[in-house]
Amino acid sequence: MALLSVQNLTMRFGDKLIQEEVSFEVEPGTIFAIMGGSGCGKSTLLKHLIGLLCPAEGQVLYDGQDYWQSSEEDRNKLRAGFGVLFQSAALWSSMTVLENVLLPLEQHTDLSENERIDRAKEALSWVELGDYADYSPADLSGGMKKRAGLARAIAAQPRLLFLDEPSAGLDPISSKRLDDLVLDIRDRTGAAVLMVSHELPSLFAIADDSIFLDADSKRPIAHGKPAELLKTADHPTVRAFLHREKP
């Protein structure tokens, strides 16, 4: 059974259609990418998957359980298995890096205080920020903030990790470093990763599968591994996206 199954999902804001007929599955231990141009609904889809927006139609299933048909108690249990890295990293500026990473452990685990601290420090060591636990987020570079956000996302050892434009705004070296960390975390934990991205190097390097959301037709128009779609996609929008050159 797929860890995440999206079935005939329709997304709307009032009468405005964002996307429809969105269906895909994410298997444990794989990296799945949501691709598409600006304004096609990538981040909106992510919000539907993590429980921030309710679909107009369709289902979001976790281990076969319909998230939006579940009780609030069951939704909370499902959310405890999610880790989320937001595009801006979304670190609390009033907290230290360590305190930020401790948040999901305090909310979603029964670990003792010492166990939570040990787990948070371990997560920071995974992302090579072990020496920055007592820093303020304001004292970190952009790439370091992303890695701190990633540490927070993985601290509770989620089965499913959501990444919203993880490489956005990073220089090529920092972006490659983050890609390597995502692969390392996937290999260490066996977690599935779902990422929203338009960064071609990341998509080609780490994604096992993907869908492409089209802003014009407002539905997916391609499905497959990005590196394979680069060779086989026949839709002109998908080809233009995957064959584009950076300025």
Image (cartoon, helix red, strand yellow):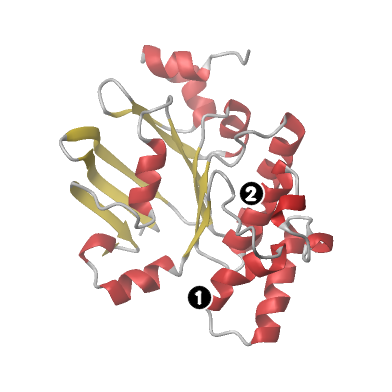
Mark closest to the chain's N terminus, 1 or 2:
1
Left or right of 116 on screen, residue 220:
left
Q: Report whether 91 appears left or right of 75.
A: right
Query: Which of the numbered marks, if any, corresponds to residue 193?
Result: none
At label 1, which amino acid type do we have? Answer: Gln
Q: Are marks 1 and 2 in contact (CB under 8 Å)?
A: no
Q: Which mark is residue 182?
A: 2
Mark 1 Cα-neighbour bin, 10 Å: few <14, some 14–19, many ≥20: few
The residue that appears at 51% across and 35% down in the rendered structure is 197
Judge whether residue 234 can be spotted in this image.
no
- For image coordinates 30% across by 52% down, the residue present is 53
Q: How many marks?
A: 2
Element under label 1? helix
Q: Nearer the viewer, residue 195 or 87?
A: 87
* Residue positioned most to the front: 94
The quarter in which the N terminus is drawn is: bottom left
Residue 106 appears at what percent x and percent y?
56, 77
Task: Give x and y (percent) for residue 200.
Answer: 58, 26
At horizontal 52% and vertical 29% (from top left) the residue drawn is 198
Is 144 drawn above or below residue 135 in the view shown?
A: above
Q: In x, y percent, where is residue 199? A: 57, 29
Find disc 1 in the rendering and name its residue. 107
Q: Quadrant of residue 214?
A: top left
178 horizontally vs 4: left or right: right
Q: Residue furthest bottom?
A: 112
- Report if residue 138 is visible in the image: yes
Q: Amino acid at mark 2?
A: Val
